[in-house]
């Protein structure tokens, strides 16, 4: 594996790591419907403002979301909404696993 290939694989892994937390995955799915301010996300999740901000920071570092400050509010959006195109495939894997368990 070349250094360039290694760097690319590591960058891809970082995206998956960022989406690997249930709250961050939920936020990405919410942002797929359109941008939201941190205050809107805080209302829908039972965690404090700083926790949501930390999760959004991780998503931003991985390149999943972008932010824009407007007045006192910060709005987030998915940078590349196609990132969630993988979810139907993931759900198919989950359903198949459930079927295997049911058929045992």
Image: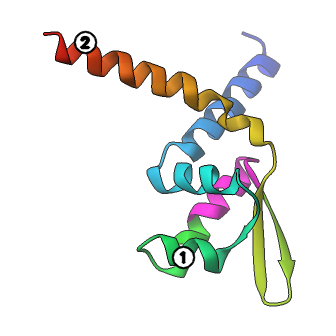
- Is residue 59 highlighted in magenta? yes
Mark 2, other Cα within 10 Å: few <14 / some 14–19 / many ≥20: few
Quadrant (top left, top right, bottom left, bottom right) of the N terminus: top right
Which image quadrant is residue 89 in?
A: top right
User: Residue at the spot x=47%, y=20% of the render?
Assistant: 92
Quadrant (top left, top right, bottom left, bottom right) of the C terminus: top left
Which-is-in-front pick, marks 1 and 2? 2
Q: In this view, does 57 lie above or below 82?
A: below
Q: Give the range drawn in magenta.
A: 55-65
Q: Majority secondary structure of the magenta segment?
A: helix
On residue 100, the disc is 2
**Extreme residue toward the bottom, this view:** 72
User: Residue at the spot x=57%, y=62% of the render?
Assistant: 55
On residue 42, the disc is 1
- Is residue 30 highlighted in magenta? no
For this view, does 24 lie left or right of residue 95?
A: right
Tell me residue 48's x, y (percent).
Answer: 47, 80
Q: Is residue 42 above or below residue 83?
A: below
């Amino acid at each position: 594996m070349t250094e360039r290939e290694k760097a690319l694989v590591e960058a891809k892994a970082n995206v998956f790591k960022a989406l690997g937390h249930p709250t961050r995955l939920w936020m990405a799915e919410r942002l797929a419907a359109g941008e939201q301010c941190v205050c809107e996300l805080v209302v829908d999740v039972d965690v404090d403002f700083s926790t949501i901000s930390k999760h959004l920071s991780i998503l931003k570092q991985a390149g999943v979301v972008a932010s824009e400050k407007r007045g006192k509010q910060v709005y987030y959006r998915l940078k590349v909404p196609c990132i969630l195109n993988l979810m139907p495939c993931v759900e198919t894997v989950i359903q198949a696993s459930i079927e295997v368990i049911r058929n045992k």
